[in-house]
Image: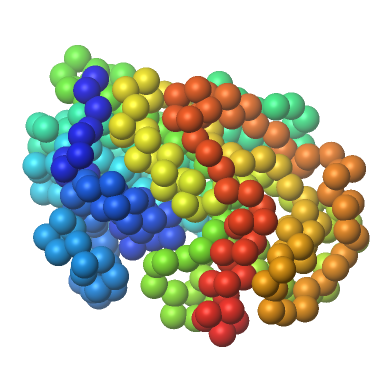
């Protein structure tokens, strides 16, 4: 499939979100034009002000409910590519449907709209997650062939009583792969079933925990996106236990690298039809304390913890990122660079 070229128009769903707004920014910086969807006109106002220097290079449209049939029918008209980035991420969901419906129906819905009205679309890239890849307690290096069947089983067995983490992981797994018990037609299934009549190809990006500076609208600390708040509480919150700092953790990627990966996925022909894990590497929380405390411009006193303990720690989870390196040539921000950007951001906000 041909890839996009400078000046092409890209539809970005959920354009006001933590990840998506960075993708919008990078697209505009690279001389693409953007149509971004938001759930309300109020949310669009912030985007229009933030990107006002780009004039008519950005268009904001309202899609109130991404789960409705035909929600994106108008939005896909006249665009050359689609970044579907609108999907909830939080771990406090009380019901399965709360996360599964928007993750699944939003994803398949935008694919249906692209098939119906996206006559000029060359590629659709979907933001998935490593939550659909890894399984808690499994000691292996995960790759793009792996699926989080453990979370799916927990949802099947316990429904709304399953943990918030399992609900989120299952929602991302369902959106990409589905599960017979739920009779869900999901992204890859939809693509395969309609391949003969589709003129575009599909890619999925699977980032790990996403940290980094926020440029979306955040009115107060309580409104901070889930992953950034997790980092804030762990690094700046105090009261961390030795076990928490030395043992607990995950893998990370900077939000700016996630944005870059999305644009590269649209640009690189070889990314078509691929599921791609993007991760800068593993961490335990002590690593972030060490990174933050190493910064010469640090303006606040942080917990020191157990300096260097992360070097001897077993990585909580590991991923094979060779596909991202081979196809995208993606470069990653270091922990020190991420910590610097986040601490500056928090300081400027008075947090």
Q: Position of residue 297 (x, y in %)?
A: 67, 72
Disc tally is 0
Residue 203 vertical placement versus 84 (above, below) = above
Q: Residue at x 47, y 52 (%)?
A: 256
Q: Residue furthest bottom?
A: 350
Q: Is residue 174 left or right of residue 154?
A: left
* Quadrant occupied by the C terminus: bottom right
Kindly indicate the quadrant of the structure image that contains residue 303.
bottom right
| Spot occupied by residue 345 in the image (x, y as percentages of width and height) | 54, 72
Residue drawn at (25%, 66%), measured in percent from left and top? 51
Q: Nearer the viewer, residue 76 or 28?
A: 28
The colour scheme used here is rainbow
Residue at image position (45%, 24%) is 327
The answer to whether residue 170 shows anywhere in this view is: no
The residue nearer to you, when weighing 140 against 148, is 140
**In this orientation, does residue 218 appear?**
yes
Position above or below: 221 against 168: below
Q: Residue furthest front?
A: 296
Q: Position of residue 272 (x, y in %)?
A: 34, 23
Residue 351 higher or lower than 6, as above or below: below
Question: Where on the picture, by quarter, is residue 170?
Answer: top right
Q: Quadrant of the N terminus?
A: top left
Q: Residue at x 70, y 46 (%)?
A: 250
List x then y, in percent, for residue 32: 21, 46
């Amino acid at each position: 499939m041909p890839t996009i070229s400078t000046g092409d128009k890209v539809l970005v769903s959920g354009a006001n979100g933590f990840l998506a707004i960075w993708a919008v920014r990078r697209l505009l910086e690279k001389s693409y034009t953007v149509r971004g969807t938001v759930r309300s006109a109020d949310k669009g106002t912030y985007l229009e002000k933030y990107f006002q220097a780009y004039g008519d290079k950005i268009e904001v449209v309202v899609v109130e409910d991404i789960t409705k049939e035909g929600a994106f029918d108008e939005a896909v008209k006249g665009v050359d590519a689609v970044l579907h980035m609108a999907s909830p991420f939080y771990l406090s969901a009380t019901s399965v449907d709360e996360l599964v419906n928007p993750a699944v129906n939003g994803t398949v819905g935008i694919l249906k709209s692209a098939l119906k009205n996206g006559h000029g679309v060359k590629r659709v890239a979907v933001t998935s997650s490593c939550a659909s890849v890894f399984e808690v307690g499994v000691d292996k290096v995960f790759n793009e062939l792996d699926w989080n069947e453990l979370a799916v089983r927990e949802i099947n067995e316990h429904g709304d009583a399953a943990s918030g983490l399992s609900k989120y992981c299952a929602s991302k797994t369902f959106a990409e792969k589905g599960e017979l018990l739920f009779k869900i037609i999901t992204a890859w299934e939809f693509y395969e079933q309609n391949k003969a009549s589709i003129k575009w190809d599909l890619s999925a990006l699977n980032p790990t925990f996403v940290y980094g500076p926020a440029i979306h609208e955040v009115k107060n600390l309580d409104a901070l996106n889930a992953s950034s708040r997790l980092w804030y509480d762990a690094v700046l919150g105090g009261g961390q236990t030795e076990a928490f700092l030395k043992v607990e953790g995950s893998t990370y990627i900077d939000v700016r690298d996630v944005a870059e990966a999305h644009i590269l996925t649209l640009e690189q022909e070889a990314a078509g039809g691929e599921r791609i894990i993007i991760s800068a590497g593993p961490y335990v929380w002590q690593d972030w304390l060490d990174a933050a405390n190493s910064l010469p411009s640090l303006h606040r006193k942080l917990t020191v913890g157990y300096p260097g303990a992360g070097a001897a720690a077993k990585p909580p989870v590991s991923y094979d990122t060779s596909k991202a390196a081979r196809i995208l040539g993606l470069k990653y921000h270091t922990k020190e660079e991420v910590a610097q950007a986040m601490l500056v951001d928090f300081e400027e906000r008075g947090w």
